[in-house]
Image (cartoon, rainbow, N blue to C red):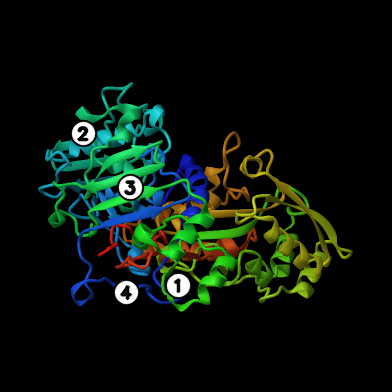
Amino acid sequence: MRQPSVISRRVAAATVTLVLAAGAAACGPEDSKGGDSGSGAEGKPQKGGTLTVLNSNTQQDFDPARLYTSGGGNIPSLVFRTLTTRNREDGAEGAQVVPDLATDLGKPNADATVWTYTLKEGLKYEDGTAITSADIKYGIERSFAPELSGGAPYLRDWLIGGADYQGPYKDKKGLDSIEVPDDRTIVFRLNKPEGEFPYLATQTQTTPVPKAKDTGTKYEEHPVSSGPYKVVTNENDGERLVLERNPHWSATTDEERKAYPDRIDVRSGLDSAVINQRLSASQGPDAAAVTTDTNLGPAELAKVSSDKKLAARVGTGHFGYTNYIAFNPKVKPFDDPKVRQAVSYAIDRSSVVNAAGGSSLAEPATTFLPERDSFGHTPYDHFPAGKTGDAVKAKELLKEAGYDKGLTVTLTHSNDKDFETSPEIATAIQAALKKAGITVKLQGLESNDYSDTIHDAKKEPGFFLAHWGADWPSGGPFLAPIFDGRQIVEGGANFNTGFLNDPEVNKEIDEINKLTDLKAAATRWGALDKKIGEKALTVPLFHPVYKRLYGQDVKNIVISDWTGVLDVSQVAVK
């Protein structure tokens, strides 16, 4: 995915929290699809009933201008339809992009700088009025308004004139780079080739908003539904969100959302331990409950795994996410590639995985890209450390770098024990490097201070724990923000932590962005990941795995590799 500067900054801020919080359940215990596929006659899912969602994080700012598609564990997509959406299938099949409001994935011009979409016929809002292309244009334009900030900023970076546009409240003229020649056609003109525009079109900013119903910052209280459910209650800015059927939604125009329950009751701001206890007990309404943002911890997972009935109600999910060590080559001794390579060889991934919760909750990583075909994953291990590290090879490299007596470095991490940069992981790294003659002093920072420090080009330490997740399943959102030299930000949030500005890497990113064949692009992203990996600017540590409970009456469990989250649009409770 392609991201000019601002974009990735957003990804990290949102994804880093969203991803771990949103991490998920992929059907059933361990490898299985989990749960049965439905109930009722012949085991088929039936319509009716109330689905309860128990979440830790409040579904705030329920306005399509201010949300990410994956935000809220799929809840927004029950109300907001977009030009395209994710395929609602289990596993790898779910990492594909498919049409939603549009008839197809969009028609690009020769160089992918112009994308044209045609809307399906018969699309309606909750009040029965027709959805038009002008509504989509207006919905996008209002997402540029400063008072509605918070959503994904890709369109601001990609659309011609987007960088300076301030939204329709200040600029009545609108964006010339979005054209609506008729009620069913919308055309986007971009400032550079973007072959992954179909992925971008899944973002909630492409949700139609009728201008006459726009109430600005109050729109979140009752946004006009284009999906199978409408908002009937929004208490305390998303603390409780109640959805009921949109009578004018038609399944004939929506192949993705099943919309089995009559009602969906989202309760947020709950303690994670309470959520897991309620789902485990599965009493009363909790028997028809799920969570889209609360994982089982190691102790909880061990308890659940020993109970066959509970284990059958655990979903396992994978989201495109990588935890890694980052180096700042401007800081000694990490300006020397041999020192960075020595650290890479010395890493004991077994102890790191254990510190992250064990093999059920973390998979060891030697590649920056997650191990999914949609990202273009290409296996490599340039500095093979084995399971427990290669201290001998690390010492050899240190000697070559002039540190035959070892060296002392400082590792910066977050003090938040629930974070993937926790003290436990830092301590595991400290112990492994000690075997190689590297003394590691730990610098723990409170979460906000930690984030501000590692993303400030002037403050960035030489050696620290980091993480990255993508807004859609492609290599672009992983590699461009972290390794594109044109995305280095000196006076703001910087995510190119290795300050890599390699003309060949930058050129290859541009060439891949021109490709509209997403499979071909994935292959190129994988090859680029392997090439960048040789520079030892990061040490991939692990990819998280998400384990989530669901109630005993919940059926038709679907969890994809796009979000890693149980898809509430597929769930049945009868």
Regarding mark 3 in the picture, which secondary structure is present there? Answer: helix
Residue lying at 55% horizontally and 51% vertically, measured from the top left? 482
Residue 210's disc number: 2
Q: Count neighbours of disc 1 (C-alpha within 10 A) and say few if under 14, some if 14 to 19, many if 20 or more.
A: many
Is 511 in front, or is 3? Answer: 3
Q: Can residue 335 be seen by looking at this rendering? A: yes
Is 43 in front, or is 72? Answer: 43
How far apart marks 1 and 2 lie (CA) works out to 45 Å
Contact between labelled residues 3 and 2, with CB atoms less than 8 Å apart: no
Regarding mark 2 in the picture, which secondary structure is present there? Answer: loop
Residue 76's disc number: 3
Query: Which residue is identified by label 4?
Result: 36
Residue 310's disc number: 1
Tag 4 or tag 3, which sits nearer the N-term? 4
How far apart marks 1 and 4 lie (CA) works out to 13 Å
Regarding mark 1 in the picture, which secondary structure is present there? Answer: helix
Viewed as shown, does residue 246 lie left or right of 293? left
Residue 468 image point, x, y percent: 53, 54
